[in-house]
Image (cartoon, rainbow, N blue to C red):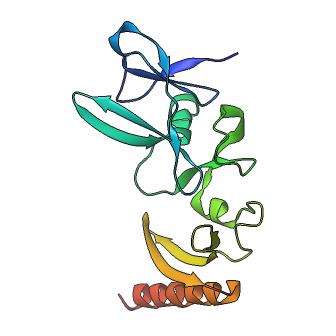
């Protein structure tokens, strides 16, 4: 059974369902929004309020409305697609996990066994990146998965050393 709830910040204008569908309530006419997908396969919808239009990912809105997720900008807790399919935004496919768990999770061959390394589908190479205090730092694209891991480890060692010296 599909259940719709108000979208935080857009109460009375838009609702989101436990099946990951977004409904507009504008002009006293209900309409399911089609949305679009970003380069990582996440569904996006454009919502407008008071003349300002913003694009939002659907899965965090489902998690906020049905799981009580609170985005705080730190990315310590993230919304994960259990089956690894970023297009599947059903509540039954979403869970809240730590960012580190999410980065280490196997995602159908696109995530490395190494922390901080994943497959970049557009660049067709391994990407290394590190999250520190909610800020993501891009470390580069690499042909070899091991080289991306080494870049991550070098940056992590530098951060640890810098923190010890302070």
Residue 21 falls left or right of residue 88: left
Q: Residue at x 44, y 27 (%)?
A: 7
Location of the N terminus (image quadrant): top right
- Can residue 68 be seen here? The reply is no
Q: x, y percentage for residue 136?
A: 45, 69
Above or below, 39 relative to 62: below
Residue 39 can be seen, yes or no: yes
* x and y percentages locating residue 62 in the rendered image: 55, 33
Q: Nearer the viewer, residue 44 or 90?
A: 44
Position of residue 102 relative to residue 52, above or below, is below
**Image-based side of 27 in relation to 111, left or right:** left
- In the image, what residue occupies the spot 64% across and 90% down? 147
The quadrant in which residue 47 appears is top left
Residue 121 in which image quadrant: bottom right
Measuring from the top left, give residue 66's x and y in whole percent.
57, 29
Find residue 152 and report its horizontal and vertical position in percent: 57, 83
- For the C terminus, the image quarter is bottom left
């Amino acid at each position: 059974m599909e259940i719709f709830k108000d979208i935080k910040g857009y109460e009375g204008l838009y609702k989101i369902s436990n099946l990951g569908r977004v409904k507009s309530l504008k002009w006293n006419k209900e309409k399911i929004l089609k949305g679009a997908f970003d380069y990582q396969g996440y569904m996006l919808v454009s919502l407008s309020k008071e003349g300002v239009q913003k694009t939002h990912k659907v899965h965090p809105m489902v998690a906020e409305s049905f799981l009580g997720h609170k985005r705080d900008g730190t990315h310590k807790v993230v919304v994960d697609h259990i089956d690894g399919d970023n297009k599947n935004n059903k509540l039954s496919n979403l869970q809240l996990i730590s960012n580190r768990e999410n980065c280490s999770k196997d995602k159908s061959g696109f995530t490395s066994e190494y922390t901080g390394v994943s497959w970049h589908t557009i660049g067709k190479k391994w990407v290394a990146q590190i999250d520190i205090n909610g800020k993501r730092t891009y470390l580069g694209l690499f042909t070899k998965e091991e080289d991306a891991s080494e870049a991550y480890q070098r940056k992590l060692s530098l951060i640890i050393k810098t923190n010890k010296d302070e």
